[in-house]
Image: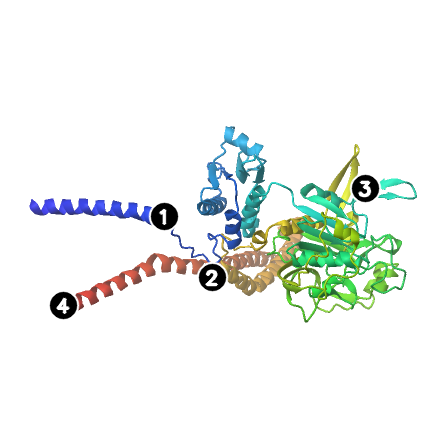
Amino acid sequence: MSRKYYSGLGLALLALAFLLVSMLNNLLFSGVRFDLTENKLYTLSEGSREIVANIQEPINLYFFFSDKASEDLTSLRAYANRVRELLEEYQKISDGRIRLTVVDPEPFSDAEDRAGAFGLQGIPVNNAGDEVYFGLAASNALDDQESIPFFQPSKEEFLEYDISKLIQNLSVTSKPKVGLLSSMKIQGDINMTTFQTTPAWVIADQLGQVFDLQNIEPTADSLPADLDVLVIVHPKNLPESLLFAIDQFALSGGRVMVFVDPMAEADRVQSMPGMPPGGAGASDFPLLTAWGIALSQEGMLADAGYGLTVGGRGGQPVRHLGIVGVQADGFKQDDVVLANLETINMSTAGIIELLADRTTDVETLIHSSAYAQPVDAVRFQMLNDPADLQRDFKPTGITYPLAVRITGRADTAYPDGPPEPLSASSEDNGESQALSAPAVTSTEDLNVIVVADTDMLTDRLWVQVQDFFGQRIASPWANNGDFVVNAVDNLTGSGALISIRSRGRFSRPFDVVQELRREAEAAYQDSADELQAQLNETEQRLTELQGAADENSLLSLSPEQEAELVRFQEEKLRIRRELRDVRHRLDSDIETLGTTLRFLNIALMPVLFSLALMVIAYLRMAGRNGRE
């Protein structure tokens, strides 16, 4: 009895000790986590931590996910769990400044109405009309709202960027101020012949909807003092004082996006035939050299890989090597600016050359296909038939940079100080960047995007505009506008937001399985094709014989013909059986791999672990016996 008593008391004490240890673990080590994933999927980057640390007022996050309606969507539920855990990580590091609420918007509930009010999208999942909500809504103390309508699994690499951007937008109450400096009338003009106003380009309207767009005349001496981003389009003959102001703006942490062009077709003052680059139709922006790049003097881009089809001489369709539609394989897709874009159209684009003595880091965002060649600008200027570009065209096999991001260390283009003489107006204007201020000679944090084409901004290359009862309706058919807005939006973000690059995917592909499938298909496809050809030939011969049998009846067929008919029927069955076996063998290697993995996980590893424990126990017992 005493033995049973002590045994029961020992079990009770053991259970009590387990509870105490669990409570102490939750109390003392609740914040301790180990992220063992390859790309640190569950660890927030330093940029996200900086954004959260700068939150001044509480932010409410509402994570909407339809739990019941997604019961059969296993992969979506796994991704939703990943999103929820990442949001919980934001909440943990915020010291109470981020409040997370998880909401299941069941059909016809107040939660579903609330999701719709936030602008979240419900995706139908069955014929019964059930919808799955999978999005994020947020609000701050001023009742400003931001939302991610639906977390698209295809954008998983940019999940952290999207969430951090949403939080930063709620931390800043005013629209970012973007300056637009252009030698062309992008924001509309007055036709002096008809005295009618010409509408603004659609790209200007889109930028104006998202940002506080400030127009800067190309004859100005300085820049507004509170710009977040400066967009420069086709700079020509800019005053030295303005160039100096742009130089100082970029070196002082300002973000810049520049569109240059060796032959801007949209420019009102076109180059004269035969005029080389640098003439009236070419951009002129000397600061590019200080940033480590230049427009190539070898010529303009001709690209047979991305060339678009246009109407040629006599109305016949012809591929225009100078008007290109760059596809996704020409994008740096792990950059958030170009994520999920499909086509960007350009016309008579230049080629960006990287200077050997640069101190900056240059990343190519958009490049040509390998079927491209530099062509002298004179050929484009005097071109009458697009088919003429294909004469003597010899692709070099090189992909040419068309848009780049420049970062890192850069020195001023004015090492001797501001240009002289200074404009009196710029010295007296308190709203402008003073040129008499001490010059910034260098920076370690340059951030500039340069695009070697200005015509991509024109409506004709990416959007169709229609008048609908006095309103202009724009229907884009390329992603030019998305690219520009994404780029400016990225540049308006803080350095912390820009530093958040794409992360890895939560759902990892089975690379070994995919490689086995490719090898199996390569090994068996030849035999499958041969058998399929034999089957087609046999079926054709069999059809001919059966047709003859129907016309003449079996009684009129000779014994040899009957035997041939039977032989072809048997041959057809044999070939179909072999073809079926070949198709089964396509997956045999994958099934073998799966069986091996199951054996390793279910049988071998537990056996090895048990043997290791037995060896350790034996060694301990042997050591104890030796000491006794």
Label located before the other in sequence (1 or 3): 1
Label located before the other in sequence (4 or 3): 3
Q: What residue type is disc 4 on? A: Asn
Report how far apart the C-alphas of labels 2 and 3 lie in the structure: 63 Å
Label located before the other in sequence (1 or 4): 1
- As rendered, which of 352 and 555 lies closer to the eye? 352
Report how far apart the C-alphas of labels 1 and 2 lie in the structure: 45 Å
Question: Is 387 located above or below residue 57 in the figure?
Answer: below
Visible in this render: residue 465?
Answer: yes
Visible in this render: residue 260?
Answer: no
Q: Mark 4 points at which residue?
A: 625
**Which residue is painted at 66% across and 59% down in the image?**
251
Residues at marks 2 and 3 touching, judged by CB atoms closer than 8 Å:
no
Q: What residue type is disc 3 on? A: Pro
Say left or right for 172 vs 600.
right
Q: What residue type is disc 2 on? A: Asp
Report how far apart the C-alphas of labels 4 and 3 lie in the structure: 96 Å
Q: In the drawing, what numbered circle is on residue 589?
A: 2
Secondary structure under the numbered disc 1 in the rendered image: loop
- As rendered, which of 52 and 207 lies closer to the eye? 52
Q: How many labels does the image show?
A: 4
